[in-house]
Image: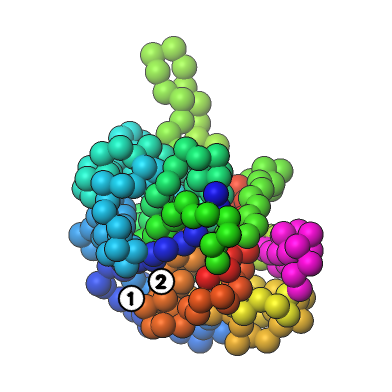
Amino acid sequence: MKTKIIGTGHYLPEKVVTNDDLAQIMDTSDEWIRKRTGIATRHISVDESTTDLSIKASLNAIENAGVDPKDIDLIIVATVSGDYLYPNTACQVQKAIGAEKARTIEINIGCAGCIYSMDIADSYIRSGKSKLALVMGAETLSKMMDWTDRRTAVLFGDGAGAFILKAVDDNEEGGIEAIMARGDGERGDTLTAGGRPLDNPWGHLDSPAGKYTYMDGQEVFKFACRKVPESIHEILDPLGVKPDDIDKYFLHQANIRILETVAKFLKQPMEKFPVNMSEVGNISAASIPTIMDMYNKKGLLKKGEKYILCGFGAGLTYATAYVIW
Ligand code: UT7
């Protein structure tokens, strides 16, 4: 068996915050944000939780795939901004959509989370343990920001995106042809947010990281520009597939300059690199399913086309898939 993407979905909160809106509350400008990142607006939740966004994106993907949620046997939600430590977000989604027989997993991988989830689901499907999986990224990153820190707060947004994955026969056309995922824990301190530190009647530890997101932007930028092309070659070269053969590169939407640098490394035109960060900002694990769903709903994903999906971020981590649509 192999894994095929048979549906996509996303959900964005209604409120749109522009760069000019941010310039009202911190020392920044529309010009700086657009020029240095490519971001113009982002969606920010005012009354919806990560669980709410997850459920709405899931239902959207289920409708797109035309499947019965009762047949879903695996749910993986990638998030760094879940509402509870427990129960996890996947259990909340399960309850809402009525996927009674699903395994329910939440993973904390940061911006590579959805492709990591896809890697896990692909293993379940190839081993025969899953026939129909819901994998998604969902984030309310707005609660993870220090809204006085212009270096991070202008970059991120809220949203959720989902894929429905199905087990299909190996001889069926299309599917996930190759997928990899990796961590580089040595560089973990370049992108952090604190968890709950040890605190009990016998001991106490200070949190190793601050309450809000800290990012050494330039280090993460360099990491992405090196690892994205490397990982693409790692999965394509053994298959004899060349970067020229790829129709679209769906990269994590962190910064337009990362896409431009990767395009240059791979000697590919920017037209092959879909962009929605201008509209939604960096929505971490939700980024790739959201942009793919936008393309899908506009009829821009074509049967037989070859795509690269690549996420990178906190950990540091990265994950890359080669998919034939
Ligand atoms: O999603 C997870 C993965 N994340 C990423 O891939 C992010 C990768 N990194 C980046 O995208 C970029 O490094 C950033 C967008 C985060 C920053 O861009 P940069 O070109 O690396 O800027 P910088 O941090 O080197 O800052 C340059 C200048 C500094 O001023 P000085 O020290 O040169 O006077 C900053 O204080 O720009 C200043 N600056 C700002 N100015 C206006 C930083 N943020 C802002 C801002 N508005 N929002």
Secondary element at image label 1? strand
Q: Which of the 4 image quarters holds residue 87?
A: top left
| The residue stretch that appears in magenta | 224-242
Along the viewing direction, whichever of 77 and 72 lies nearer the viewer:
72
Indicate left or right for 324 with 221 as reference: left
Looking at the picture, which amino acid does disc 2 mark? Asp
Along the viewing direction, whichever of 72 and 87 lies nearer the viewer:
72
**Coordinates of residue 113 in the picture (x, y in percent):** 51, 52
Q: Which residue is mark 2?
A: 293
> Is residue 134 in view from this perspective?
yes
Along the viewing direction, whichever of 29 and 263 lies nearer the viewer:
263
Secondary element at image label 2? helix
Q: Which of the 4 image quarters holds residue 234?
A: bottom right
Q: Measuring 68% from the left and 86% from the top, which residue is drawn there?
A: 269
Please identify, in this view, whether the residue under mark 1 or under mark 2 is nearer the observer.
2
Binning the other alpha carbons within 10 Å of mark 2 as few (below 14), some (14 to 19) or many (20 upward) gives many
Indicate left or right for 235 with 310 as reference: right
Q: Is residue 274 above or below residue 105?
A: below
Q: Measuring 33% from the left and 76% from the top, which residue is drawn there?
A: 17
